[in-house]
Image (cartoon, helix red, strand yellow):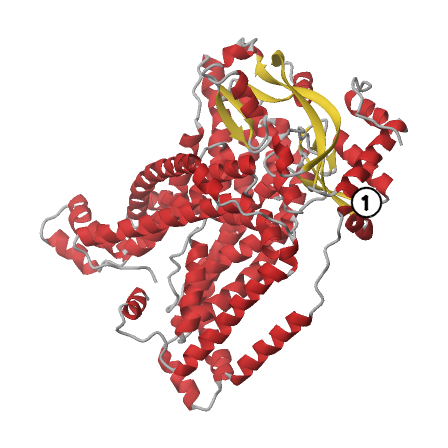
Amino acid sequence: MRRLSLALLALAVALAVAPEARAADSLLDKVQQKKEMVVGVKYDFPPLGSINKDTGKPEGFEIDLANEIAKELGVKATFVQALSKTRIPLIVNGNVDLIVATMTHKREREQAIDFTMHYMITGQRAVTRKDTGITHVSQLAGKQVASVQGGNAGPNLLKVQPKAVLVQFQEQTEALLALKQKKVDAVVGDDVLNQYWVKQDPGLVLVGKLYTIEPYGMGVRQNDSRWRNAINQALMEIWDSGRYHEIHFKWFGAKPDFEIPWYPK
Amino acid sequence: MDSFWKWSVIPDNAGFFAGGFKLTLTIFVVAWVGCWAFAVVFGAMRHSERPWLRYPAAAVVEVIRGTPGLMFVVWVYFLSQPLIGYALSPFWAAVWALVIHQGAYGAEVVRAGLSSVPRGQLAAGYSTGLGYAGVMGWIVLPQALRNMAPAIVNRSVALFKNTSLAFVIGVIEFFRAGTIVNGRENASFAVFTFLAAVYFVCCFSLSRLGHRLGQRPGVIEDTTAV
Amino acid sequence: MVEAVLGRVRGRRPWFETPGERRAFVLVWGGLAALAVWFFFFGPRARYDYNWRWSVVWQYRHFLLRGVGTTLYIFAWSLGFSLVLGIFCGIGRTSGVRWVRALSTGYVEVFRNIPLLVQMWWAYFGLQQVLNVVLNDPFGLRVLIPSTFACILALSLYTGAYMGEVVRSGIRSIARGQWEAATSTGLSQAQTWRHVVLPQALVIVIPPLASEVLNIIKNSAVAMTIAITDLMFFSQKIEEETFAGFEAYTAGTLLFLLLTLLTVGAIYLLQRLLGLKVRTAG
């Protein structure tokens, strides 16, 4: 018993005098110190983020963009999967340093995280099979519509068509699978992916017009201006040097039809 | 009919599946070590005669056993930062979640194994002058381990099956590899039958081993499933 | 162990047998508690700024209730099916007829060695593809497998396999003499099963059967991955809307524990109502 109490006392003393690890004040310092930036990206969202069939590694527009940003900062980017429902917790909990995962910059999301300037603008629309004959969102009343847990595609659809029945999956690929298996009549999501799907599968067709505007912003930790500014400035450098246009052309086959909210030095 | 027999999807993506399977095995091996370390500590505490060790250990084990495994995986991944101030990668979060969750079940196995050794043997061991370590090492543990062996194998099979839960936090293990391939190729029947077959072969061989080990008297009944 | 705790709570036994025990308890657990407090408030964790918002649990209680409702719905159906499956499987495994025995053994081995996750996804996506190819496309039908059906199917088959094993061990523990006595008094096979063997066997295996029943509740959390809005799904949904992850998941975990406790209590009551001696596992 005496030995036990002595051991505990020694432990307590050791912990009391142990130097406490000082958390870096800004992620920028931590990232540059470790020479590594952990980025959360999508694995189910070609052409922005998906897994390469042969190498098993993530690839896509957002991955290339993140790699360019890492090059600007002089560090290496490592990638982690960010599902729609996990991307904000990943930033808030510090699991990742940056989120580049088709995340719409929304005012309510600013409660939890900060956003960089938006790097792409798209919208949301429904996709359906040719045989359903659905041509307008109003025809989705009472129908089963698939979306992804955590994304705002489902709630946005309910604003436009409150009578739709949402079926929410983990990833976009499962939603598409449910559509192809005829379990659901439509899938709602960001148009970038919808266009990709429709190009790949002639049996799918877009429904009507875009009903939201989705500016994609990169997610960073809250109250970390130095880190956010670093990312913004890296993004502008990439835009100025034309690398953004190259990457966009590589993945979309066209130049971007929008401008990032650039500002001078 | 063409999509029904899309078996070609499997060999086409064999490399990807193999990578996922390797990760599953890695998670399994690492978590196995941690799980049994946890189980031994808590099982011994639960078996102890000192109530101040027994009741807290029992409380911890019962609470962990009453929680779904998926919940644990999510907890450890997202709440590691608020709880312990350090953000775990998906791989390590999955490993720790499995260690804790399956370890609680393992603690029950260890406890039952320790109780399966008759008390008289302990008394006899002490009376021949062996200390606590001697009695434990020479008398109790060898017998307890032999009695626990099939239950240990059962738990290990359960651990292997539960590695698939890691997929919700983005670990590209075997199951997730399957769902990614399926999402791309739309060959649900082929892919999921293949996944089921591989898991079956692995778990069945393990459980056959346990069955062989269980054909002796004195073996404890493993009634803790999952 | 329940009796030991109850004895102490009712004051009939002292909590610590010797003063040394009390000292050891205070030192070890007090020390660990102090460590936890230091770690939480002064250690590396404290650097992390988190404002606790437990009120969201109350605000979103309707989400949690809906989740509990779906989980209970899945639980009830799976319980019914898996019990029936388990009993038949247990009988089959001890049967004298070889093909019945082989079939039951095959069922148990297959469904116990495949993860529930794989089974559920197979039932939801794989089976649907089979139906589409065989039934829907050729005949222009639209037979769909809803996610709750897939979940209950997979969960019942999975748990039924485990219950079959449990029932089998119960049946095997009934002395051979009872069989022979029953047959000698003129009871048929089916009557022997119904009136002599099964009642005794099932009562004997109530503890392990109870732990399987609890496993149904816990395993049903996996249903969230095939778009079922159960308790796990709603805990996540609250986290998405309020960004209060800790509070949301704690609420979900506590509700799961509560469901588990309620089920244990229900089984206890059932034993009492049937006039049986209460058996607890371990």
| Residue at image coords 50%, 55% | B101
Disc 1 secondary structure class: strand
Query: Which residue sits furthest left?
Result: C185
Q: Is residue B166 left or right of residue A100?
A: left
Residue A120 seen by the camera: yes
**Residue C99, position as x, y percentages in the image:** 34, 43
Quarter the C terminus of chain A occupies: top right
Q: Nearer the viewer, residue C266 or A177?
A: C266
**Residue C260, position as x, y percentages in the image:** 36, 49
**Residue A45, position as x, y percentages in the image:** 67, 29
Q: Is residue A245 left or right of residue C210?
A: right
Residue B152 vs C84, above or below: the answer is below
Residue named by callout 1: A76
Give, as a three-letter code, the residue at label 1.
Lys
Q: Is residue C6 left or right of residue C233?
A: left
Residue B192 vs C176, above or below: the answer is above
**Residue A73, position as x, y percentages in the image:** 84, 42
| Residue at image coords 28%, 69% | C7
Number of numbered markers: 1
Residue A102 vs C13, above or below: the answer is above
Q: Nearer the viewer, residue B91 or C45?
A: C45
Q: Is residue C5 left or right of residue C240?
A: left
